[in-house]
Amino acid sequence: MKVLIINGPNLNLLGTREPEIYGNVSMENYLENLKSEFQAHELIYYQSNIEGELINRLQEDDFDAVVINPGAFTHYSYAIADCLKNIRKPKVEVHISNIYKREEFRQKSVTAANTDAVLSGFGMNGYRLALLSLK
C-alpha cells in the first residue's frame, strides 16, 4: 500500500518546536522508524507551510491512503476539507497534541469530518497508529 503522510504548517520544525508539546524527535527521524516498521508499505512524506501546495499534493492522487496532520489549517481550512472530501481512499487525521486540551480555537477541526478517523494526543506515535489502522 502506498501511503501519503502529509503535514501542514510549522511541522517542518518538529524536534525543535515547542518540545514540551511536540517532543524532540524530527519528522525525518521518526519517518525512518516508520519505514523500518512498515516495510510492506511505501511511505511518501510531504510537508508544506502553504495551503495550496498541500491541496495540490493531495490532488496528485498517486497513493492508496492518506495520513494527514493539517497543523493549524485543521481549524479553518475549508479548502483542505473540501479536497479531503473528494478523496475516495482511506484517510486518517493525526494530531500530535491533544487538541481538546489546547486553546479553544484549536479544539475544532473543520477537516476531520472528511476523514475516516482522527488520532489526537498520542504524540508522534499517532502516525504509527494511523498506519496500523490501514493494514
Image (cartoon, rainbow, N blue to C red):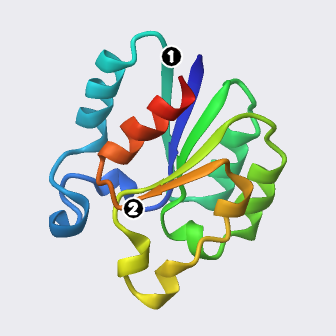
Amino acid on which disc 2 is placed: Asn
Mark 1 burial class by Cα count in 10 Å: few <14, some 14-19, many 20+: some
Horizontal side of 76 relative to 106 (left or right) equals right
Earlier along the polypeptide chain: callout 1 or callout 2?
Answer: 2
* Between 41 and 44, the one nearer to me in the picture: 41
Q: Residue at x 57, y 59 (%)?
A: 50
Disc number placed over residue 130 in the picture, else none: none
Q: Nearer the viewer, residue 56 or 66?
A: 66
The residue identified by callout 2 is 10
- Relative to 72, is 110 on the left or the right? right
Q: Residue furthest bottom?
A: 104
**In the rendered image, the vertical position of residue 129 relative to residue 49, given as above or below:** above
Vertical side of 27 occupied by 22: above or below: below
Residue 44 in percent (x, y) is at: 51, 27
Determine the residue located farthest toward the top in the rendered image. 40
Taking 21 as reference, is 34 above or below it?
Answer: above
The residue lying toward the viewer, choosing from 105 and 48, is 105
The image shows residue 107 at horizontal and vertical percentages of 50, 79
The percent position of residue 83, horizontal first and vertical second, equals: 78, 52
Circle 1 residue: 42
Residue at 68%, 56% in the rendered image:
52
Instruction: Count residues near mark 2 (Cα–Cα under 10 Å), then give few for <14, some for 14-19, many for 20+.
Output: some
87 left or right, relative to 23: right
The picture places residue 61, in percent across and down from the top left corner, at: 75, 30
On the image, which quarter does residue 64 sit in?
A: top right
- Amino acid of disc 1: Glu
- What residue do we see at 70% from left, 24% from top? 62
Query: Which residue appears at 17% of the width and 63% of the height?
Result: 19
